[in-house]
Amino acid sequence: MSKSNIFKKISGLNRTLHEPSRLAIMTVLSSCESADFLFLRRVTALSKGNLSSHLSRLEKEKLVNIQKTYEGKKPVTIISLTKAGKKAIKNHWDQLEELKKQSSDWEPEFEKKTPGSDTL
Amino acid sequence: MTSFTTRLEQIRKITRFYDKLQGLKMIPVAIYLFGIALYRSELWHWFTIWNPVSTFGLLVLCAAGYVVIDKYYKRNFGRVTSSSSEHFTEWLLPGLLVVLLIASGYIEFYAALPLSLSCLVISVLLFYFYREDRSLRFHYLIWSAIIFLMGILPLFGFYSPSQVYLMGPDAQISLVVLGVILLTAGLIDHSKLVQTISANTETA
């Protein structure tokens, strides 16, 4: 695989998902049916505001469903992946795995042509 | 990148096994087993003469304790609904094993087997827990081996098989050992849950 192909694939990654916090949120949600806001906050270690803004972005992209319910008087926010979200996170991890494999095979050109390397 | 992917792998595991890592829930179960062992050994006269009220009362107390601990986890760590593939291992498989356990308890007692069939069933269940995730749940391999040994030791004359029958009238050993194992395994699971979540908070 050529260098340009690898970089083309990297630039083709879904930017919404590739952001570390959103990748963590999506990875957590892909391991379960749904999780509440508190659990996501505990495992991702994000602040309430940060988590809310990331979830809004994901909801806007139709990758997650956000349901607000009440348990007694206490509000509970349940988050789950949409079908598109499930597909997107799976594709994203597949792409990352493929890139990891390809980049380990790739030998940068500057390592091949070190000046004076043939005299050593 | 590597530490980030390792962290993601950790939180993926924690999410997948969240229900099973709520180890403090094992405390009331272990207390109930100790109570039954106490009743069978007749060490506490009051508990024995008041049976079945005392046993039923203990069961109610332990069930209430279980509910309180469940609320503690929901309030402090949040809630997760497992994926449908996990439902099988969460409900159906343990349900089947409970039926198998009761059946093996009766078989070993009425057929007067020279070993404990119920201990072997529990050992298989614990081994299954270990197989679910070998790194996170490694300690279940040790518990599985201990219960297996406890089940077969009567074959070598270490103690009477009736002492390790699950339904046997003098089966205090198996209940106490099982209680200690559930308690220790639960505490280890809980500490793993807390450690992973605190590590995430520190690295964030």
Image (cartoon, rainbow, N blue to C red):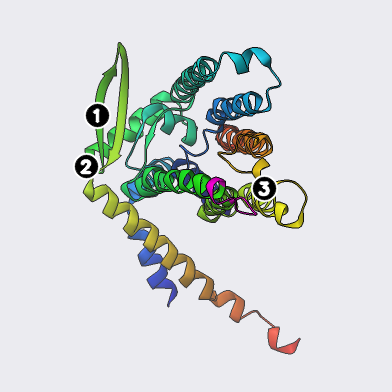
Q: What span is in magenta?
A: B109-116
Residue A110 in the figure: left or right of residue B172: left
The amino acid sitting under disc 2 is Lys
Which marked residue is nearer to the observer: mark 1 or mark 2?
1
Compare residues B17 and B53 and report the one nearer the observer.
B53
**Residue B127 vs residue B175, the one in the foreground:** B175
- 3D distance between C-alphas at marks 3 and 1: 55 Å
Pick the quarter of the image with the C terminus of chain B. top right
Q: Is residue B90 magenta?
A: no
Q: How far, Cα to Cα, is label 1 from label 2?
A: 13 Å
Residue B150 at x, y = what percent? 69, 49
Cα separation, mark 3 vs mark 2, equals: 61 Å
**Number of other residues with Cα within 10 Å of mark 1, as a class: few under 14, some 14 to 19, many 20 or more:** few
Q: Mark 3 or 1, which is nearer the eye?
A: 3
Q: Mark 2 points at which residue?
A: A62
Residue under label 1: A67
Q: Main secondary structure of the magenta part?
A: loop
Badge 3: chain ID: B
The residue pinned by badge 3 equals B161
**B1 shown above or below B182:** below
Q: Which of marks 1 and 2 is nearer the N terminus?
A: 2
Picture coordinates of residue B96 (x, y %)? 40, 48
Name the residue at 37% across, 41% down: B82
User: In the displayed structure, would residue A49 be above or below residue A23?
Assistant: above
Q: Which amino acid does label 1 sit on?
A: Gln
Q: Do labels 1 and 2 share a chain?
A: yes
Specify whether residue A105 is in view.
Answer: yes
- Amino acid type, label 3: Pro
In the image, A4 versus B199, the foreground residue is B199
